[in-house]
Image: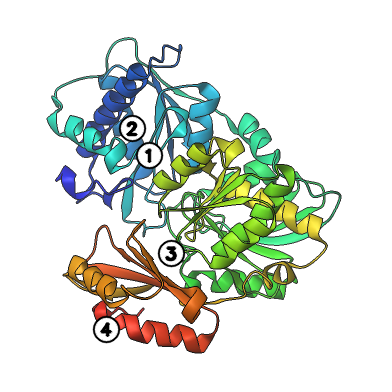
Amino acid sequence: MLGRIFKAYDIRGTYPDLLNDQMAWQIGFGCARFLLEDAAAAGETTPMMRTLVVGRDMRQSSPQLVDRLVNGIRSHGASVIDLGLCDTPMVYFAINYLDCSGGVMVTASHNPPQYNGFKVSKRLAKPVGETTGLAEVRKHAAMVDRSLEPQDGTTSEPRDLWEPYTKHVLSFLDLGGKSLKIVVDASNGSAGTMVPKIFGRNGKAIDGLQIIEMNFENSKGEFAHEPNPLVASNLEQLQKSVTRNSADLGICFDGDADRCVVVDEQGQIVGCDHLTALLAKRFLKKKPGSAIVYDLRSTKAVSEEVKQAGGKPIRGRVGHVFMKALLGEHKAVFGGELSGHFYFAKNFNADSGAIAMATVLSTLAEADQPMSALIAPIARYVQSGEVNFEIEEKDEALDAVRTHFADRGEIDELDGVTIDCFDDEGWWANIRKSNTEPLLRLNTEAKDTETLEAAIEEIAPMLGVRVEH
């Protein structure tokens, strides 16, 4: 049963059928054993080495899962600092602030309310994925003696870290005396707690900031809309509110508030890759010549804008495990993914929806232009968005694509298959396999709509049956 809930980057399943309380205890034990052994192998001997931090989102099953998770952690001999209801980036902050061996966030992020799960991080808030520790966690959890009890001397202590966490996030905010009115959609998730704690109720903790709050209620674990800001229909309420209130901006968070999507003053959705390009220029002003990391699905405008601003664009694989590693490897100052994750060197190379919000507001305040005007020159190419195709023979389909385009443009396999015919034919495309479903995911970009449609028409027959949403 455990194998069904362990994914590539986290642990997730429906509660209580696929993921239950007993499993939470086993996973707690497995996490504690892996994280403590990993810290010891690194030679860490800090006073907090045998301590883990735990946080949770707003789902109805989260408090019970935390209770069982903590018991499992203590059964391996580790103590716990319980952050309570918070956003996932607060766990990353706490691991570094307290200098402990790692942490676990109880959350299912953007999934429907019947789901729950665990995001695991080791020292310095480095992510734990299938190839970086989750396989070991699964093994330890499966083999544990279920009769074990919490060890003597271990504790579970609630700790309020909102004051230092707020100071950290607000170090990224500078409105320069300007006034901004924004609408924030918390998606009935962790942002409903995080935003008032950091920015004040309705933004009143920050001079010049007015926040119109939407879907901040998170005590019932119910969602007014799916807490996934990448689905356009989930942004409709926010878009209407922005235009109705003549706001400068709209921001929508996902369930655990590590991702966010921006809506401009006209109610138009801002592509996360376009936002990456915009924010990159802000960080390059502060640290000229730095590297900027972006995922390979992003518009070509990202690398072009970064080069124009004097930076070094670093193209990376999709997923926070790879993005965080690239930030560290290249000493990058900032990074962004098409999925709405934004990464910051001064945030331990980790992603943060709250810091992304602070950075967007600072950029907008400094520009003296509306968001639509800032994005327009960056959004200069036509994009397909992610198009899914159902197919069982995924590898055979990718082989067909490689063969078909072998003599055209450039082909690389950094993540899936990327065909770049931009210089000669005005388009490029990436095709990636889903980790969990019989799907291929196509992202295409071109210089104009006609070229885009022609490229998709040529590629699509090789990928299977198009999945319409």
Q: Are marks 2 and 1 in contact (CB under 8 Å)?
A: yes
Where, quadrant-wise, is the C terminus in this rendering?
bottom left
> Pointer 2: what residue?
67
* Closer to the camera in the image, 424 or 281: 424
Amino acid carrying label 1: it is Pro
Instruction: Report the residue at 34% width, 85% height from top.
Output: 458
Instruction: Report the residue at 35% width, 15% height from top.
Output: 154
Amino acid carrying label 3: it is Glu
**What separation in Å lies between label 1 and label 3 (alpha carbons)?**
21 Å
Closer to the observer: label 4 or label 2?
Answer: 4
Closer to the observer: label 2 or label 3?
Answer: 3
Position of 107 relative to 50 (above/below): below
- Counting from the top left corner in percent of width and height, residue 64 is at 33, 38
> Pointer 3: what residue?
226
Question: Which element carries disc 2, helix, strand or loop?
Answer: helix
Instruction: Report the residue at 63% width, 56% height from top.
Output: 306
> Pointer 4: what residue?
461
Position of 218 relative to 467 (above/below): above
> Pointer 1: what residue?
63
Q: Earlier in the sequence, mark 4 or mark 1?
A: 1
Q: Residues within 10 Å of mark 1 (few under 14, many from 20)?
A: some
**What separation in Å lies between label 2 and label 3 (alpha carbons)?**
26 Å
Instruction: Report the residue at 56% width, 38% height from top.
Output: 331
Position of 160 relative to 399 (above/below): above
- Counting from the top left corner in percent of width and height, residue 192 is at 56, 51
